[in-house]
Amino acid sequence: MIRSILLHGLVIAALIALEPMLSEYHHGNLARIMVLATYAVGYNVLFGYTGLLSLGHAMFFAAGMYGCALMVRLAEWSVGPAFLVGVACALIAGIVVGFLALRTIGVGFMIVTLMFAEAAYLTILYYNEYTRGDEGFTIPQSVRAIGTLDLSDTTTRYFAALTLFSICLIASAALVQSKAGRVLIAIRENEDRVRMLGFDPFRYKLLALVTSAVMAGAAGAAYAVLFGYAGASFAGVQYSIFPLLWVLLGGPGTTLGPLLGAVLMFYLVDYASGTIMPGLAALVETQFGIEAPGLASAWLLLVGVALVLLVLFAPRGLLGTVRVRMIPWLP
Amino acid sequence: MDLLSYLPFTLPHPALLLAGVLEGTVLAAVLALTALGLSIVFGIMRVVNVAHGEFYMLGAVLAWFITHTITGAVGGPPWLGFAVALIVAPLIVAAIAATTDWLILKRLNYDPEATIVATIGILYILQQLALTFYGPDARPVEAPFDFRVQTPYFGYSGYKLCVVGAAILLMLVVWLVLTRTKIGFVMRATQYDSETAQAFGIPVDKVYAGVFALGAGLAAIGAVLIVPIQQAHYLMGGDPLLLSFIVVILGGLGSLKGTLVAAIFIGLSDGIISTLYEPTLAKILATLLVAMVLVFRPQGLFGARAA
Amino acid sequence: MAAIAQLTAKGLIKDFGGLRAVDVDGFTLHEGEIRAVIGPNGAGKTTFVSLLCGRFPPTRGTIAFAGRDITATPAHERVALGIAYTFQITSIFGNLSLYENVALPSQRRVTLDGNGKVRERAMAALERVGLADRAGEIASAQSYGHQRLLEVAMGLALAPKVLILDEPTQGLADSEIADFIALIRDVAQETTILLIEHNMPVVMALAETITVLDQGRVLAEGAPEAIRANAAVQTAYLGG
């Protein structure tokens, strides 16, 4: 327990200490990564610890994002209360989807969540008049402030993202090491046995799903506030796959895996689409004379390759492997 | 005053309705073919293939490459290019699918959840490779022949009607193969109990690779048929995937008859609704319906109890 | 012995498709007894006790526990009432430590009682089956016999009123079986035991009453000596 508190404290302290050292470019990146990692931490509670693989988490991220951004845009609320509305939207979505989707298991659960998310995505497109569909809309810099705190300022934004991430990280660590967390992990291992030990698996799965949805929603709302934009692409299938990929890479069922996975994948995609892929495209055309008109923009290729490689060769992810090989107490 | 104006909705003009039914029939035919591929793969292998739409897309893109080469570079007639594409493109797609099965799915022992994650990865790999070599543009393929069939209101593309005929013919062939031949028997034996099938000397690995190839090939044939009507584009796999999912789930997972009934139902209603009303709303309702069916009636709406 | 009815079933029927797996007119388990359920393979023993503990609902019939109708009570609530079930196929949490395996039912008991310590209760359960010194080890790394004992420890940690054991000695070595018989005698001091068992020496050593199932029906019921002498039972077992 003490080791676990020290470890998480150390990671958060490192993120604080890093702030003044970062270039403007990395500063913005890391703020974004921490918001996305918050989303992944939420995803991990459901997938990594409870063993429920959702293919529709973007609907919770989008519920937070649009719940918040539309209150600012249409009702002209200030971003603080609007953020809470976003989180509340994700909470309600989590409860409703949970009551329905948790009646299914395994592949059924995956497809039901996928379908709900697709319906949510199409709904955003359908109400184009308010949401401006794929194009999305911006939240003006002038309103992105809580009192005198200017959230569009890069340093403030960094620490706001860090605060949100830290709260969710600590909450997830506390949850999975609590009595309820013990039941969640047991459900992942063998649900039928958990039932025959006197627990109602449905209640615990609902708890995990709602917690997960709230964290995803908080991340979505924070994204809208901190980066001033809401768009339908955040509700698309891709944004349901991303947290799965980050968690798989970092290590499902490890508290710090989501952050590690999000950092690595963000920079891998960033470096590849900025440097490797255009270079490769030029090389293929000049050296081999093969036309590859789309290679420079095909960064999603990495996502596909990473998913296949992880599921084939490293289903435990990085920190999961570290736990098995070196540090068995890793939370 | 016209009594009809008191109705709470406007009746479409008969010409528009006929157009909707015709378009819906074409869509239903191609959809049935594509969904049949998904359904066979799920029915026999218990694999939910999320990359199914990308095999469809590959079929269309390869059809463009083949017809482009034959009519453009060699100077052959459009029908020749199309005929070659109709045979070669599905074969290439089937070979790619069999390789995917052998390289990836087999190594996962077809574990349901791991397989879905892997096919999501395969989806991105195929789609992005298409973007890499085919590029981001949509390109048309010329129809092999062109004549109009006259209806009371308008002339309708004879090619589109031939697509319907071809799809029905192909489905009949697949049905005959599955129910009347030794290959079909081997497939059904594998579906029933793969371990016993293995013990009786059925090469289960090869059957699985073959079934996966067949499923992908059916999607590719559907795409080659449709590509003179819709242009080939690297992102075109999304819609047929979603619609196939809807069809296969409403029809009852793994039930071939249910799949066909649902394909006709969804294809027709989608065709009519897209022609006359708001397609996005129809899709929202369809996806919600699918989710509710999985939650409350997992055996599907049209299928008998899951086989 | 005082025959207070604890767990009873009336007109209990379970159909799977067209097949009638269980058809038990009446069954009464008395408080404090050790009851064995025996019968040939496919007699419906596991299905029968699964109905009792609520893993699936009966097609018809009623089940009552301590005078209360529990036919519609979900499995997890029956466990809370005091009916514990240990699986025929070892069903432990393989990736977790032995301690975590028993901590889960201990935690449930502590929550239900509103007092006690999870750690003490879990360690006591491990102690009782002789696995306390292995508490930190991973369950899947244990020998088959130890896994069976862990399964029993998980049941004990719930401190149930009725403990249903589904073929607990299957796959155990002879020396382990002797220890197991002693353990069950000890547990029976405070708990009613319902035992599905194939191993006849174990049945004869433990059971006070034996219920024989055949093709889903109760073929005979009585004291071990009477059952041993019963012609119908012999026919069923010999396949005559």
Image (cartoon, coloured by chain):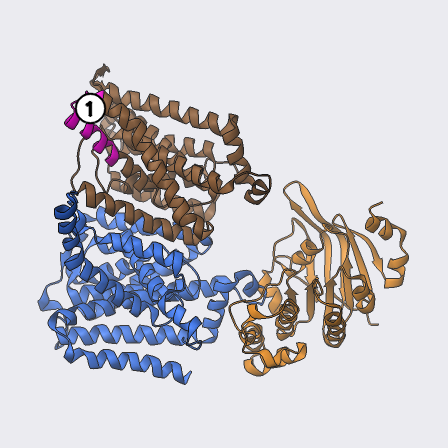
Chain colours: A blue, B brown, C orange
Q: Up-down: is A304 above or below C204?
A: above
Residue at point 80%, 69% (across, down): C206
Between residue B81 and residue A135, name the one nearer to us. B81
Magenta segment, prevailing SS (helix, strand or loop): helix
Residue indicated by mark 1: B1
| Quadrant assignment, res B215 | top left
User: At label 1, which amino acid type do we have?
Assistant: Met
Res. A159 in view: yes
Which of the image's four quarters has the N terminus of chain B? top left
| Quadrant assignment, res B82 | top left
Q: Is residue A257 left or right of residue A328?
A: left
Q: Which residues, given as a range, are shown in magenta?
A: B61-79
Q: Residue furthest left?
A: A142
Residue at point 50%, 31% (across, down): B184
Q: Position of residue C11 (x, y in %)?
A: 73, 51
Q: Residue furthest front?
A: A287
